[in-house]
Image (spheres, grey):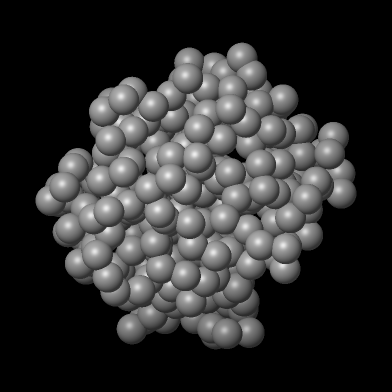
Amino acid sequence: MLSASLPGGTWTLGDLTVTRFGYGAMQLAGTGVMGPPADRDGALAVLREVVERGITHIDTSGAYGPHITNRLIREALQPYPESLHIVTKVGATRDQNGGWPPAREPEALRRSVHENLQTLGLDALDLVNLRLGDAQGPQPGSLAEPFETLVELQRQGLIRHLGVSNATAEQVTEARAIAPIVCVQNMYNLAYRQDDGLIDALAADGIAYVPFFPLGGFSPLQSSALSATAARLDATPMSVALAWLLQRSPNILLIPGTSSAEHLRENVAGAGLPLSGDDLAELDKIGR
């Protein structure tokens, strides 16, 4: 176990202690997050590498594959280490064209929770995020009915903790008025900074913020500030972007995904890159 070498330390989600550097399992499925992986043995190997490195936070969803990623996690890691916590999402399904249509009706959510339990081989899910909005991002509207369905399943003992994903600040407030949440999972990175205020408010209340697609397609060509900082530090732009996220706020948890064990190791090393105050000030200008 190499958890002592992981950047960022740990964070507590309710009663679950997780490493701030986690792993997103989305890329383990096939092209377009559909079907089996091209390299099944490689997918199993990277999951085992995750645990060997001491990472205790894996993010997944029954929609990945669909169900393929969950089954890979079960095959690679069951019996699960006591320290490992698997986070999943419900609220979207897949269509034959690879789309992500919403599935937030009460019966669809109940079915999705039970499918996650079955495919992961668990009696209860550590944390379930309700996915809102659509592929374009968060959309306004009440989350009361779907969120209350998950609260009911939590009371039945099938879910330990709740969160929301792809949510507006107003939806986060509404969810918290219904039941406690332990995390918000939204799009956020150096260039996409709409949630700055929300991150700070959640940090003050001890609630985690988990950016998905943390690099957001970001490339050196899109930012001279990023490429200049990376060159000065003799690092890759990806390393700088991951390190910036960890240093942006103590409640930010990373879930970068990869299907390569080598790339996983590179991400871990990159996220630990020390950034000076001058580096952070320069990078901070990118999203302003």
The residue located at (31%, 25%) in the rendering is 156
Name the quarter where the C terminus is drawn: bottom left
Q: Is residue 101 above or below residue 42?
A: below
Residue lying at the far front in this picture: please name it.
107
The residue located at (87%, 49%) in the rendering is 38
Quarter of the rendering containing residue 78: top right
Give left or right: position of 195 versus 261. left
Question: Where residue 266 sits: x, y (%)?
Answer: 66, 48
* Camera-side residue of 82 and 268: 82
* Camera-side residue of 80 and 241: 80
Give left or right: position of 86 versus 17. right
* Camera-side residue of 89 and 233: 89
Q: Is residue 36 above or below residue 52?
A: below
Question: Where residue 260 sits: x, y (%)?
Answer: 75, 46
Q: Is residue 150 above or below residue 73?
A: below
The residue located at (43%, 73%) in the rendering is 137
Question: Where residue 145 sits: x, y (%)?
Answer: 27, 54
Tell me, yes or no, if residue 209 can be seen here: no
Tell me, yes or no, if residue 195 can be seen here: yes
Question: Where residue 71 sits: x, y (%)?
Answer: 69, 33
* Camera-side residue of 95 and 275: 95
The residue located at (60%, 50%) in the rendering is 63
Numbered circles on residues, count: 0
Quarter of the rendering containing residue 281: bottom left
Give left or right: position of 250 versus 260. left
